[in-house]
Image (cartoon, rainbow, N blue to C red):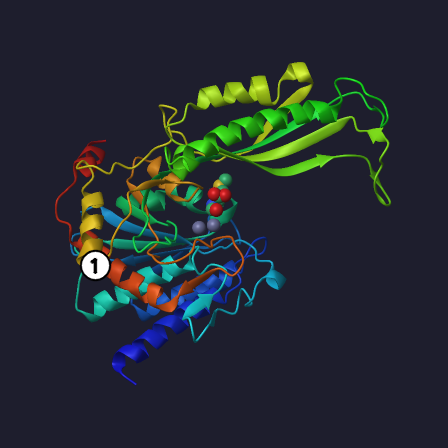
């Protein structure tokens, strides 16, 4: 067995070990994950601390000190939690991280989203250390809880903390998405989640009677109008006029109405209340005021006995009412450095996109920091939150080389960027 084979085997084993820690909501094994990361950090002689902004939700912060600590630092962020898995619908157990010997696929919840990235950062650092590299800029790694449930107690509290302020971060890397093509996807902004519940009320009555203004009719009129809106947005994507992250998506995620009976629902009673929930995602460039008007006037009008409520408007808006995006022109040297570092190891990039869902990157962007969403998975079907989530072993190993190149370029960058200079003046 060659040295490379032995190294790869050890690298894959560490990935599997992390994947086997069941950090699925609603009871993520955060402590176990934090201990695992801390032990990895120890083997790399990185400074390590566990921050617990909220009890039972540890955040692991690692530091590889740079030769010039005065320069703004690099933050490599990843979340330790994963979404739940419906065990019985998977071909492989979701927390066993089995490696299929014929395909090389590693099956596990979190293999794409995003335990891969967290450990790839560490493996890249292991390789850089072995090559004798020493960073000029300080590199931090944060392993944060709760991303999948909004990130308020994780990246949110972290980005607000004095610890974070003292880190003097200049650039953040966070998660992206797998790409089925041979080119990686990369993200400079993301849509805002608006989780909307609309409620209709109306007069109850006999199931045989036709009359106006029932709760069901009132709700259905809204659903029809929302569906028309959804179809128009989706058509723009289907016609290739807009990318996924550039339209407003609206998906109905629950429907609740009816009068329960021991055998199901009462069939001859028109209920007096009905409600529906929608996961809406709003691009940074969308006219959010006009969407708000549409909700109040067309989707849940008081004139039709309707009310509405936001369960989450997770977007963080800056003082101009905008959700921030990261520049991808010459004003942001980190962008060019990333492109170059990836191409140096023969990686290719798709055109940068707006992330269709949400990530912790928004907590950093709103502080005026550049944040890039990137998970090095090419030739991979997008399976995050899906059954049989997997990542191929070779793709994982390739991703480590990509990060090695990126971290080296970032940590060696000498110039003070324009951004950094203006932040220093504040
Ligand atoms: C309200 S924040 C929710 C965050 C979650 N992130 C990944 O899937 C998402 O649904 O996009
Ligand atoms: Zn994620
Ligand atoms: Zn996720």
Q: Position of residue 417 (x, y in %)?
A: 16, 40
Taking depth in this image into account, of 397 and 392 the one nearest to the observer is 392
Dot 1: element: loop
Query: Could you tell me which residue is drawn at 68 percent across and 31 percent down?
Result: 275
Q: How many marks?
A: 1
Corner quadrant of residue 397: bottom left
The image position of residue 337, as x and y in percent, is 18, 48
Task: Where is residue 225? Give x, y as percent.
Answer: 58, 24
Who is closer to the viewer here, 61 or 324?
324
Closer to the camera in the image, 44 or 386 = 386
Q: Position of residue 5 (x, y in %)?
A: 30, 79
Q: Quadrant of the C terminus?
A: top left
Q: Quadrant of residue 61?
A: bottom left
| Tag 1 residue | 346
At x 31% / y 80%, what residue is drawn? Answer: 6
Is 305 displayed left or right of 418 in the figure?
right
Which residue: 30% across, 61% down?
A: 399
* Residue neighbourhood size for the residue with mark 1, other residues' Cα within 10 Å, grouped as few (<14), some (14–19), many (≥20): few
Whether residue 348 is situated above or below residue 289 in the rendered picture: below
Can the viewer see residue 339? yes
Please identify the residue farthest to the top as the structure is shown. 303
Q: Is residue 419 above or below residue 305?
A: below
Residue located farthest toward the bottom when viewing the structure as drawn: 1
Q: Is residue 24 left or right of residue 247?
A: right
Q: Is residue 248 visible?
A: no
On screen, residue 196 versus residue 281, left or right, reads right
Against 67, residue 248 (above or below) is above
């Amino acid at each position: 067995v060659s040295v490379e084979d032995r190294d790869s085997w050890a690298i894959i084993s560490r990935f599997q070990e992390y994947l086997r820690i069941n950090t699925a909501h609603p009871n993520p094994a955060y402590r176990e994950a934090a201990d695992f990361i801390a032990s990895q950090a120890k083997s790399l002689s990185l400074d390590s601390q566990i921050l617990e902004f909220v009890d039972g939700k540890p955040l692991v912060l690692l530091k590889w000190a740079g030769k010039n600590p005065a320069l703004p630092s690099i933050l490599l962020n990843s979340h330790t939690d994963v979404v739940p898995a419906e065990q019985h619908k998977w071909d492989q157990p979701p927390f066993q991280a089995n490696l299929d010997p014929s395909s090389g696929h590693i099956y596990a919840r979190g293999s794409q989203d995003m335990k891969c990235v967290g450990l790839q950062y560490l493996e890249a650092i292991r390789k850089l250390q072995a090559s004798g590299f020493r960073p000029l800029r300080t590199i931090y790694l944060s392993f944060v809880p709760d991303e999948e449930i909004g990130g308020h107690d994780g990246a949110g509290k972290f980005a607000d903390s004095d610890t974070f302020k003292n880190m003097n971060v200049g650039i953040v890397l966070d998660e992206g998405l797998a790409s089925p093509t041979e080119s990686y996807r990369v993200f400079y902004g993301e849509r805002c989640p608006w989780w909307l519940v609309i409620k209709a009320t109306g007069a109850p009555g006999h199931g045989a009677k036709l009359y106006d203004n029932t709760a069901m009719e009132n709700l259905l009129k809204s659903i029809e109008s929302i569906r028309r809106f959804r179809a128009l947005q989706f058509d723009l994507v289907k016609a290739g006029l807009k990318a996924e992250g550039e339209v407003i998506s609206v998906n109905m995620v629950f429907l609740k109405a009816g009068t329960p009976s021991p055998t199901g629902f009462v069939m001859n009673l028109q209920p007096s209340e009905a409600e529906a929930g929608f996961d809406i995602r709003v691009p940074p460039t969308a006219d959010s005021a006009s969407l708000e008007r549409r909700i109040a006037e067309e989707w849940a009008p008081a004139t039709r006995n309707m009310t509405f409520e936001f369960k989450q408007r997770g977007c963080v808006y800056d003082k101009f009412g905008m959700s921030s995006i990261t520049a991808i022109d010459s004003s942001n040297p980190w962008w060019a450095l990333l492109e170059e570092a990836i191409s140096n190891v023969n990686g290719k990039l798709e055109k940068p996109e707006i992330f269709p869902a949400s990530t912790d990157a928004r907590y950093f962007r709103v502080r005026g920091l550049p944040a890039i969403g990137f998970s090095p998975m090419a030739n991979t079907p997008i399976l995050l939150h899906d059954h049989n989530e997997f990542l191929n072993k070779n793709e994982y190993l390739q991703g480590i080389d990509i990060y090695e190149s990126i971290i080296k370029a970032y940590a060696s960058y000498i110039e003070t960027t324009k951004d950094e200079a203006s932040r220093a003046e504040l």
